[in-house]
Image (cartoon, rainbow, N blue to C red):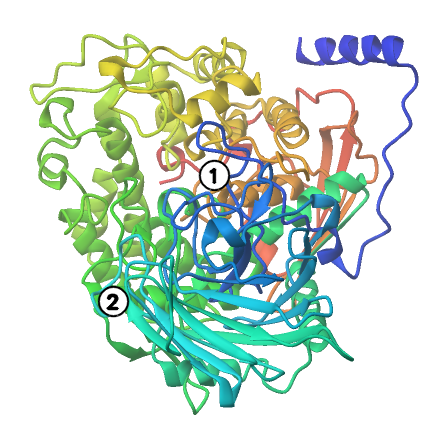
Amino acid sequence: MIRKTATLFCVFLSAVLGAQQPAPETPAFTETPVDYVNPLMGTDSDFDLSTGNVYPAIALPWGMNFWTPQTGEMGSGWTYTYNARKIRGFKQTHQPSPWMNDYGQFSIMPVSDSLRFTEEERASWFSHKAEVSTPYYYKVFLADHNITTEITPTERAACFRIHYRNTDAAYLVLDAFDKGSYVKVIPEERRIIGYTTKNSGGVPENFRNYFVLEFDRDIASAQTFDGDSLQSGLSFEGNHAGAVVRFRTSGKSNVVALKVASSFISAEQAERNLEEVKDLSFDQVADKGKEEWNRVLGKIQVSGGSEDQVKTFYSCLYRSLLFPRKFYEYDGNGDPIHYSPYNGKVLPGYMFTDTGFWDTFRALFPMMNLVYADMAAKMQQGLVNAYKESGWLPEWASPGLRNIMIGNNSASVVADGYYKLHEDHTYDINTLFEALENGAHNEGPLDAVGRKGAPYYNDLGYLPYDSGINQNVSRTLEYAYNDFTIYRLARALNKPDSIVEHYRQRSLNYRNLFDPETGFMRPRAKDGRFRREFNPIDWSRDFTEGNSMHYSWSVFHDIQGYIDLLGGEEAFARQLDTVFHSPSTILPRKSGRPIIHEMREMQVADMGQYAHGNQPAQHMIYLYNYVGQPWKTQYWIRETLNRMYTPAPDGYCGDEDNGQTSAWYVFSALGFYPVCPGVDEYVLGAPLFRNAWIHLDNGKTITITAPENSDENRYISGLKVNGRKHTANYLDFGLLKKGARLDFEMSPDPDTRRGTRKKDYPYSLSNRE
């Protein structure tokens, strides 16, 4: 039925629109993948509807500091929106998402003619027609000031090149923002130093971001300001400090070069971080940034797709390589040190932050573990330090512990990391296992740390809806999966059988919420009775940003167990079909609760109740592989890749969320996906490109070919792995890690015989252990 409908639709389009020219294709592969990245993809968003909720991050991969043009007001999470008309400044930012907001931020803004330093006064009209945005270089024309500004970053520093016109009234505003800040202008050194303390939470009391600015020409005059009031002195400390310096740009050169760096450790460390650009010109920094992005993006090469597909792929890969950010610096000996966002001390070792495991355990961290293993191992070392410094593993860090989202998904991040990394990397896994056990049995200092409702879960095996704990169904299902990953890790570490079996049994707790009457996971009371009022498409308080039709499939580790509960493979497939073919209805929420943007994004996508714009549903497409119908997975993957992603400002179908939604695209375009992080398998989809090469950190390469691949030929008719016929609906990590060749045969018609035997099904706890 799917095939017939798609064919008739294509015939209709051809009749109405006439013959279409094929989309231009990219070369065999590109040596400069950064040229295909559009940092503006996903920036056309707002509070009510997200098409990414991102900003153009001018940064290096995993850089400590990002820079971005600031269109939003000071303190707004929507720091840059594509439909804005004015730029208020160029902000050093550490914001992971608008919902988390920012910390340690300050901004720089050039103005001319007259002194305008407040946010509203200095704002300038701009146009995307006069804007160049790449990961390593940004340029824009500020129309109200007749100034062109260029920026290029390093990990902890940046260079500005500001093109004033010939004038004696060329100003630069340094805004250290409110909530406590300090500035000092040192004209004889051509410098501004200071700090900002502005943040949105998750910081110790002594939190500061120290900055230093260094100019290439004399400062003609300078003033400081306190909010909207100019001060006469060259230094000011207060609620909202800032500085304005003036240059004379008449004469030979009207270009002012500025170098800036910052540190969370100290003013002296900010000076040390400035050495990243100390002896380099603007163009040299830009060239090094481009080279680094091409190196990191080039770990995955693709060809044999349309130009837009390649742009979308590398734009998504760029987004997948920003978070978690490096929150460490280097001391005078070149050793890593960090300011702890947990206890406020300066300590040795790695630290990473600005990621929420509820989102990123699913695909972002598995992508890191496969493709960027060396960096992933450093991230695990950072988790060791986070636990030692806070007593907990962060479920959402920005920069320290934050009280948002649910689950104990640090367990998944640690377990999958160990399985994929331990043969080639060494770190303190026993301390991390201790951290997992602590988080698995206890409530933490915040609702989103440890396990909210742990006493109920430990006693009943689920969180009852009449316990006063919202999102109880979602929490229970995620806790059960988290227990599975701890079980797997305990077994790998040869922990006592009693510990291994304890977590194995707890991983089956998802069964406690299965309602045989409806076939869905349903909220349950303390006395065991299911909630009377229940509709599987109701985005109720029992679920996290979703409904039961989304969350019932969150049994990542035991899909076969869920199949058995539903009554077999046919019932499971029918239930899964229902998700995609139901109306995209959203029910009015009770108690006056508003419609949230995730609901609206599902509604407008026209894919039934499938909500790809939010994480709980993103693995569902791959579940047809568990019931011998892989061609349906292949169909819906291509639909999602084609319809839900474009390399445009509205290019996502919901929040991008720190690399997760982008990592889904990267994996799915390559032809496989980690449905269950913590096991050694990837579930097959179907590749988007005719060729791809994944260059692993161990020197091995995964080569993927699909010579007949096209939008029409989206179905797999055959697969050879290292020259041998492969019928399974999954790939082994161990096989890929050694370097492998995957040769796909693609067809316009579904192959309803391939991948239909039970031995071809991916891992489930119920059928493998």
Q: Is residue 652 left or right of residue 481?
A: right
Q: CA distance from mark 2 to mark 1?
A: 27 Å
**Image spot of residue 166 (x, y percent):** 73, 70
**Image spot of residue 516 (x, y percent):** 28, 12
**Image spot of residue 296 (x, y percent):** 64, 63
Q: Nearer the viewer, residue 550 or 214?
A: 214
Q: Check the image and report above or below for 312 versus 696.
A: above
Q: Quadrant of the N terminus?
A: top right
Q: Check the image and report above or below for 21 versus 401.
A: above
- Identify residue for label 1: 675
Type of residue at label 1? Val
**Image spot of residue 586 (x, y percent):** 41, 13
Residue 200 seen by the camera: yes
Work out whether mark 2 precedes mark 1 in sequence or the reverse, and give the earlier one. 2
Q: Nearer the viewer, residue 481 or 487?
A: 481
Q: Is residue 153 left or right of residue 206?
A: right
SS for dot 2: helix
Type of residue at label 2? Thr
Q: Is residue 33 left or right of residue 257?
A: right
SS for dot 1: loop
- Identify residue for label 2: 431
